[in-house]
Amino acid sequence: MTKRAKKTLVYLGPTLPASEVRLPNAELHPPAAVGDILRASQRTDVACIVLVDGYFERMAAVWHKELLLALERGIVVYGAASMGALRAAELHPFGMIGVGAIYRAYRDRELTADDEVAVAHLPAEHGFRAISDALVNLRHGLAEAARTRLITTRTRDTLIDLARARFYRDRSWAQMLADGRAARLPARQLDALARWPKPDAKARDARLVIDRVARDHGPKRPRFRVPRTWALRQLLAM
């Protein structure tokens, strides 16, 4: 009997089109919610989990201990770009592998707010297309624009503050520029910024983690046992 290759489960939504995931034995899933990683960790055909996107508002987010249980059971777990970056920054001491600049910014406490990576998006039948821009993408784009002297550092910092003041669902390049005009920032800089091609830091990091998984061969797996707390026992019993 031919031995079946184990699967890589990828949890992906608005950060990157599913069509860009080209991994052998990949199984694509929508953004992860509480319980999804737990169920994945109980499967015998899973070798690797890649967490990019996760739900957090209309349903409970992925629990840390779900990911720890997956690690305990010998599954290699990666995180990047969005919810994956948050969880990897919190769990890298336990063996979760974080990838990309956004993960490093959270790990090093340069970023601390969860809403930096949050976006509003359409449902699965519309490909989870994002309909707002993540603050981390706005922040990264403004930093690049200032570095290339398209805008001044003062304009950059003011625009970041204006974007941060908006609810995550209302953040976008267009709204930020409108807020900048209302704040009487230099029109020439805002006009140049409006025409400028906007980088996507989250998509970049998602591509990096997919490439990392494709290149990694049997990374070291940690050995530990997750304490079965009361809350975890309730989740396991669901």
Image (cartoon, rainbow, N blue to C red):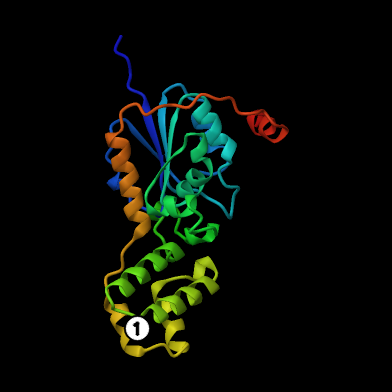
Quadrant location of residue 26? top left
Q: Nearer the viewer, residue 101 or 54?
A: 101
Quadrant location of residue 193? bottom left
Residue 221 drawn at (x, y percent): 44, 26
Q: Specify the quadrant that holds the C terminus.
A: top right
Residue 173 drawn at (x, y percent): 39, 73
**Callout 1 environment at 10 Å: few (<14), some (14 to 19), or many (20+)?**
many
Q: Is residue 226 left or right of residue 8?
A: right
Badge 1 amino acid: Leu
Residue pointed to by mark 1: 190
Q: Nearer the viewer, residue 154 or 182?
A: 154
Residue lying at 59% horizontally and 25% vertically, measured from the top left: 225
Residue 162 drawn at (x, y percent): 49, 77
Residue lying at 47% horizontally and 87% vertically, measured from the top left: 183
Is residue 175 something one can see in this rendering?
Answer: no
Q: Disc 1 on helix, strand or loop?
A: helix
Is residue 200 something one can see in this rendering?
Answer: yes
Q: How many marks?
A: 1
Residue 43 drawn at (x, y percent): 48, 25
Q: Is residue 226 left or right of residue 104?
A: right
Please identify the residue farthest to the top as the structure is shown: 1
Give above or below for 163 relative to 18. Answer: below
